[in-house]
Amino acid sequence: MVLLLLIGIPVGLEFLTRIVTHATGTSDRFTGAQAAGAINSYQLRFVDKAGQPYMGLPDSGELKAVRDPLVGYRLAANQQSDFWQINENGFRETEPVPSSKPAGEIRIFVLGGSTAFGQLSSNNQTTFTSKLETRLNERVAQQRANPNQFQPSALPFRADQVQAALALPPRIRDGQYRVINAAVPGYASGNDLALLTQQVAAYNPDFVVVMGGYADLMLPSTDRGSDVPGLEQYLTSGGQGFGAGLGDQVAAWFNQLYIVQGVKHYGLQRQQSEQQLVEPLNLYAPTLDATLSDRLPADSAELDQRVQRYGNHLRQMVRWASANQKRLIIGIEPEISTRQPETLTPEESAILAELDNSYLEQMRTGYEGLAAAANQASQLSANAQVLNFYPLYATFAGQAFKSPVGLTDEAHTLVSDRLYDAIASQLALQPQPFGL
């Protein structure tokens, strides 16, 4: 009788919870039918070639990734959520990207980690890659519709007319611009280099934008790039054993119960959201239980080695761009520690309150090293340019960050504007002298 009560009471509560939530129209808060939110949607879920999660590794995320010996890991093709869509190439695009570039298409590939991917953005269209593509194609449309508002292809004869013509905005190269988001959450510069040479180069890009830096500061100098988090720990422990994997599956089943979801949703929602905001998503660590502090360099020598690795990878990318006559833009990604106190929103203040002085100081020192390494690498070729976005949001009005490096939709617009200015200046066409 006691056993029946012990079983019957939880079962009865579960059925009652389901009936109430369905009757009140709140069941979508407790089921997987609707995305559990941006955090869960953007969390990587590592699966094998058959699409099954590795037993013993976390599998709560929705963004599927597959291990790849050449690049560490890659996004699984043909998947989507309420927040993102991944095409058949494994890129964050709605349409496939053919390997053969159509006539008149100008391709701009964006590589990088979580910031470049647009982690925590509302959808594909709110990322800086999508906004950049829209601006470039709008500029071409304006030039075609109103040619007299831009510099002519050939200068007029009279000097006064020449002066008036040169005062107009320059035209950029005519064509169909396509900005392709090939970034992968968690990637460091070593992964970007491998992806560039092993996959992206085959798509014949005209421009390559590499946005990163933060992951390199957090990646141990003994690692060349990011891999499946906790993989080494998982392998050396024999996959944590069948019992551990079974325990994870039982825990997952337990957490799906409506009554458990209700307690989490209403009782622990604020506490969990605050913790997750401070910890950047998909930040690689050799062990699964590593904290943000664990990832910081232990001393200045370790920091120097991490910066040197970043610079070495950039130099290889610059040499590739020079040899293949491609344009390379090295973007140093923004980070929350540059925000001025008077511009902080309550959400950003909550994030900074959880970041200790050691973290903030290491970010300032580390980013100085990243900028120096990037500038040094860019000097190897006129085809390379550096854009330092680290201080970009120091006085930004409104919320810029959702996490230490996760940008809001509005903040993505500012990145796209800066990239547009840099790319448009390189694409500007000079009018020919009269009579030529």
Image (cartoon, rainbow, N blue to C red):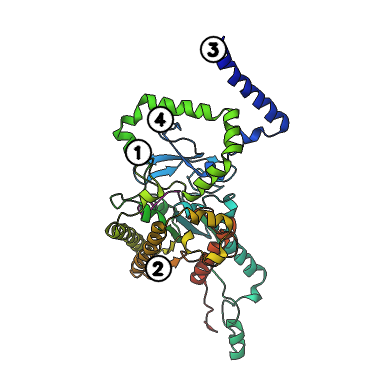
Q: Residues within 10 Å of mark 2 (few under 14, many from 20)?
A: many
Residue 32 seen in the current view: no
Q: Position of residue 143 (x, y in %)?
A: 62, 69
Seen as rendered, the residue at the extreme right is: 23
Q: Amino acid at mark 3?
A: Leu
Q: Amino acid at mark 1?
A: Leu
Span of residues in magenta: 184-191
Q: Amino acid at mark 2?
A: Asn
* Label ID, residue 231: 1
Q: Residues within 10 Å of mark 4 (few under 14, many from 20)?
A: many
Distance from Cα at disc 3 to Cα at disc 4: 32 Å
Q: Nearer the viewer, mark 1 or mark 3?
A: 3
Distance from Cα at disc 1 to Cα at disc 3: 41 Å
* Label ID, residue 55: 4
Q: Nearer the viewer, mark 3 or mark 4?
A: 3
Q: Earlier in the sequence, mark 4 or mark 1?
A: 4
Count numbered badges in the picture. Answer: 4
Callout 1: helix, strand or loop?
A: helix
Seen as rendered, the residue at the extreme top is: 1
Residue on which disc 2 sits: 383
The image shows residue 162, relative to residue 429, as above or below, that is below
Callout 2: helix, strand or loop?
A: loop
Q: Position of residue 136 (x, y in %)?
A: 57, 63
